[in-house]
Amino acid sequence: MRIGYPCINRTIGCSSARTFRLSSYSSKLLVQTVEENLACLERILHWNKAHGLYFFRITSDLVPFASHPVCRYPWWLKFLPVFRRIGRFIKSNGMRISMHPDQFVLLNAKREEVVKSSIRELVYHARVLDLMELPLSARIQIHLGGVYGDKEKSIARFIEVFLQLPKEVQRRLAIENDDRYYNLDDCLYVHKLTGIPVVFDTFHHQINPNGDSVFVGVRKAAKTWNRRKGPLMVDYSGQEPGARPGTHQQTIDLADFARFIAGVKDIEMDIMLEIKDKEKSAIKARALLNSIASQG
């Protein structure tokens, strides 16, 4: 079981998501920014290895404006050796990588221009993972999108667009139950028709349930994965006490996490902690798992 956190490491003092204003775009600025972002990503991955954290979500901002029409510079050629080197490090250390495009990626949008820009963004994400030559366990996770007044038609539209996606995107896509529109049952339905594996978000499941316990939900989602796609990916978090409902925890509640682990210990999975203090909670969770393992 790998433990990870998303995108940002606040301990090491660099960012792999540096960007700039669209109005400032130039090839020179793009190259400079991507160089810095990739260097920071390497630092993060080495830090993660040193702390036993083998699951990581790479930021979508690694290459600023990569899917925007303004970006015509062949960054994938310029930085191919760096991507390959990073990929070798990831694979040689048994790490797993994911990416999670922003909410503006809507494959079932009713506006064609939104769908087209969403596809361009997914092609960029797939290119990043392919440049690193990562296995298909490296996934791009997205939500099913909006409802637009008719859930059935919106799901059908998602499936229709998915079936037309480039193969390099199709083979890496995963869908996640969200906190508003599409719960686990909706994702399982789409999986049944498409084969897309389901990322199980424990917090979203609490907010937008289907009637199953978290433990049953984990088991159902796990069945959508296989050896080629990798183990189940779980996004784990909880409600921040005293905050607005739906607010992610500032730091991990180890007692709650231990109860969760006790209920799913027989399931092969990798856990992404969507908790605000990121690597700090990941280290605590890893230590807890190590302690449980040492006790037999």
Image (spheres, rainbow, N blue to C red):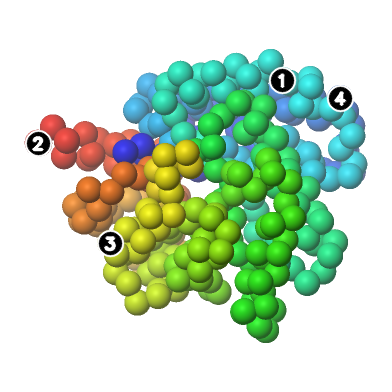
Q: Residue furthest front?
A: 193
User: In terms of sequence position, does the residue under pointer 3 or pointer 1 come before the other?
Assistant: 1
Q: Is there CB contact under 8 Å for labels 2 and 3? A: no
**Given the image, on which type of amino acid does mark 4 rest?**
Lys
Report, in whole angstroms, how far the alpha carbon at label 1 lies from the one at label 2: 44 Å
Report, in whole angstroms, how far the alpha carbon at label 1 lies from the one at label 4: 17 Å
Disc 2, SS = loop
Residue 295, picture quadrant: top left
Mark 2 is surrounded, within 10 Å at the Cα level, by few (under 14), some (14 to 19) or many (20 or more) other residues, namely few
Residue, disc 3 = 215
User: In terms of sequence position, does the residue under pointer 1 or pointer 2 come before the other?
Assistant: 1
Give the number of the mark in front: 2 or 3: 3
Mark 3 is surrounded, within 10 Å at the Cα level, by few (under 14), some (14 to 19) or many (20 or more) other residues, namely some
Residue, disc 4 = 28
Residue 131, picture quadrant: top right
Q: Residue at x 58, y 59 (%)?
A: 194
Mark 1 is surrounded, within 10 Å at the Cα level, by few (under 14), some (14 to 19) or many (20 or more) other residues, namely some
Q: Is there CB contact under 8 Å for labels 3 and 1? A: no
User: In terms of sequence position, does the residue under pointer 1 or pointer 4 come before the other?
Assistant: 4
Relative side of 214 to 189, left or right: left
Q: Which label is found at residue 295?
A: 2
Is 77 situated above or below 109? Answer: above
Answer whether residue 250 is visible to the viewer in this image: no
